[in-house]
Structures are given as C-alpha cells and as structure tokens.
Image: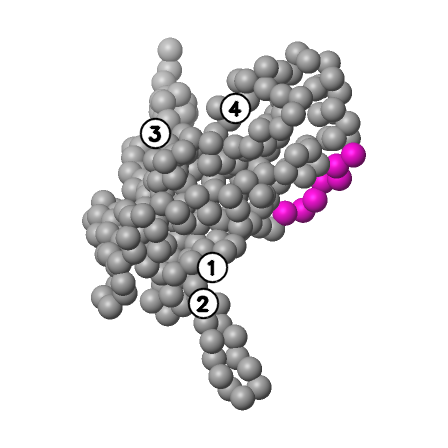
Amino acid sequence: MIITRGNIIFNAVKMQNLSPPTTPPSTIVNEYKCDICQKIFKNKAGLTRHNTIIRKYNTLREGLPVVSASLTELFKNDLIYFIHRQLPNGFKNAGKKMVSIPCSESQFHAIFKNHIHFYSKKSGVYKCWFRGKEGEEKLNQIFGNTDWGVKYYNQNQMTFVVLTDNYMSRQAETNPLALATIQKANSTLKPKKSFSKYKHGEVVIEWKRKRDKDAMGNIFSAGFIYFHFFTKQVYIA
C-alpha cells in the first residue's frame, strides 16, 4: 500500500472535520431587579443604592404637619368609598379605572409611608406600586379591610380590583346562565388598542399637586391622590 503526501493531507482534513465543534463558554448573567418597580440594574450595588434612595422618599418632608391616626382612618374610609364607586356592575363595564380625590401631602404619607417607591423633586410626584398576591396583602393591611377592592351585587355577581386571580376559583363557570352572559359580553366587545402606561394586574397610586392660574396671574394649588387599576366581574359559586 502506497501512502502519498496527498493522502496524508486528505486524512488530516477529514479527521479535523470529524472532531467535535468547540462550544463557547457559557456566561451567566445575574439580573438585579427591583420587585416593586421592575427596574433592572447592572449589579447588586445599583439595586442597593436604589433601595437606599427609596427609604428617603418615605420620610415626611421637613415643615409638613403630621396627620393624626384618627383622621387617617377616616380618610381611608373615604378612599374605599370612592374606589367602590369605580367597581360597576356588568361585564361590559370592567377595565381600566381611575379614582382622584383631594389629599394633602401629609395625609398621603400617613397612609402609604413605607410603600412610597418613587418621588420627583422637580414635579413633586409620589408613586406606589402594588401587584400580585403580596400587593393585595399590603393593601389589605393598609386599609384594614379585605373588601376595600371588592363590591358584591345581586345574583351572585362580584366586581373586584385585579391584583391576582384568587377570586376566579369562586367563579361559577358551570352555571349555564353565567357562561351565556360572559360569552355574550365578550362577543359584543370590540378589541381596542390600549396605550395605557398602567399594567393589568397592578395598582398604581400617585400623589401630585394640581395648579390653576387666573387672568390676574394668581396661582392656586391643591394636592390630589390618584388610584389607577383594572376591574373584573365574576359570578360567585
């Protein structure tokens, strides 16, 4: 058997092609994410700095009066009343809702202290985010009422603020009348393009000051609290 130089080169190339391909080393990217505002940071130090700044937002600004606990409880009841006004009956009426009522900065702090997650020194806007089961439990504790975001109607109907689907387990989907009503409501609703900055399944609470200027240049202002949320209606089994 004669082995030529060409055969050696061919066999060498063939063996090279049969060798397993080299796999690039895998890189594990650690994600440092704020569970409240969903902001992502490059490293742990950035997330730690973020949490440190947030703690400062929850300190009442110097010079503002402290609201008593008794007045705060009364104002919480007012908030629940206005939230319930935005929990209408009927599947067609479910969706994005907003509640806005006058509220001082001190009163906002008295209710949502330790839950404020954003503050803009330039605009004076505060923000809180609540989502999921944890958010629901926090709001239950803040309001001292587990039905702050639930309104009951006749014929076993209930409208609620969407944070979790925990109420869906109590929905009577086996009820033929309930199913027919839901299907009819869904068939008559036309899909709409939504450009809302608020997400389904979360409650965003804001505080900001509104200003009004008249023809003489007089400027008047008042603080307002805003609740942004989505609602849903179900049948209770």
Quarter of the image with the C terminus in it? top right
Can residue 117 be seen here?
no
Q: Residues within 10 Å of mark 1 (few under 14, many from 20)?
A: some
The residue at which mark 4 appears reads as 167
Give, as a three-letter code, the residue at label 1. Pro
Q: In the rendered view of the protein, which quadrant contains the N terminus? A: top left
Dominant SS of magenta comes to loop
| Nearer to me, 235 or 82 | 82
Residue 145 image position (x, y, % from top left): 40, 33
Whole-number angstrom distance, CA of label 3 to CA of label 2: 63 Å
Total label count? 4
Name the element at disc 2.
strand
Q: Which segment did they paint magenta?
A: 188-194
Q: Amino acid at mark 3?
A: Thr
Q: Nearer the N terminus, badge 4 or badge 2?
A: 4
Q: Is label 1 in a helix, a strand or a loop?
A: strand
Q: Are discs 2 and 1 less than 8 Å apart at CB?
A: yes
- Residue under label 3, please give it: 23
C-alpha span from label 3 to label 4: 49 Å
Circle on res. 222:
2
Q: Residues within 10 Å of mark 2 (few under 14, many from 20)?
A: few
In the image, residue 227 above or below residue 146: below
Which residue carries the number 1 mark?
A: 102
Residue drawn at point x = 29 percent, y = 48 percent: 69
Q: Nearer the viewer, mark 1 or mark 3?
A: 1
Q: Nearer the viewer, residue 162 or 150?
A: 150
Label located before the other in sequence (3 or 2)? 3
Q: Is residue 45 left or right of residue 74?
A: left
User: Are discs 1 and 3 less than 8 Å apart at CB?
Assistant: no
Q: Is residue 118 above or below residue 173?
A: below
